[in-house]
Image: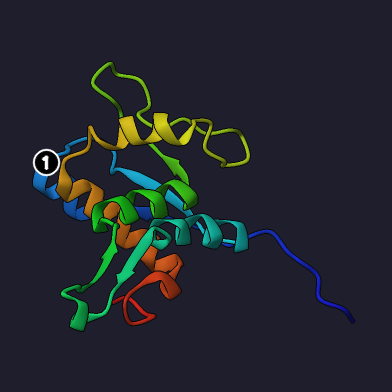
Amino acid sequence: MALKISAPIVEDFYLDESDKLYGTSEDPTKIAVRQADQGANERRSRVFAEISRIIENENDSTSMQIRQRWSMEELKRVEVFLTLAGCDIEGPDGQDLFRFTADGKLKMSEAEFAKAWALLPPFVASEIHQKVLKVNYVWSAEGEVD
């Protein structure tokens, strides 16, 4: 039988460490993370795509420069943007910080997501990103996460 593409895996997680740190006393904070597809991998790889090289001959009083622009924090944001399938964190206005369709797709542009993401405490953003790497372990530095 030929390969059949199935729906991506979606896993639910609680943000236990963030809830402990920020003293959440009500229901635990919950997120859902989707396994990335090839489209998400391609979008993620654009974070690393901007490289410029200048190679000149040292005998002619010239030098070599290699520049690469990427940010670990930008990479985290992009990875979460591509795979977040649910989140019940409220924004300062009391509304959901991130909006989703009924089938778990983000209902926000990347710019809207970045604006909402920027409101998170770094600790919370980091814990969310760790959950993303649990589902998408090939994105982690060693290919696996604790």
> Which amino acid type corresponds to the residue marked 1 in the rendered image?
Tyr
Q: How is the image coloured?
A: rainbow
**Residue at position x 53%, y 62% from top?**
41
- For label 1, the SS is helix
- Horizontally, residue 29 falls left or right of residue 59, namely right
User: Foreground residue, 51 or 114?
Assistant: 51
User: Foreground residue, 130 or 28?
Assistant: 130
State the image coordinates of residue 131 (x, y, percent, origin top left).
35, 60
**Count of labels shown?**
1
- Horizontally, residue 17 falls left or right of residue 98, namely left
- Horizontally, residue 40 falls left or right of residue 134, namely right
**Residue at position x 19%, y 83% from top?**
59
Residue at the disc numbered 1: 22
**Extreme residue toward the front, this view:** 60
**Residue at position x 39%, y 56% from top?**
47
**Residue at position x 15%, y 74% from top?**
61
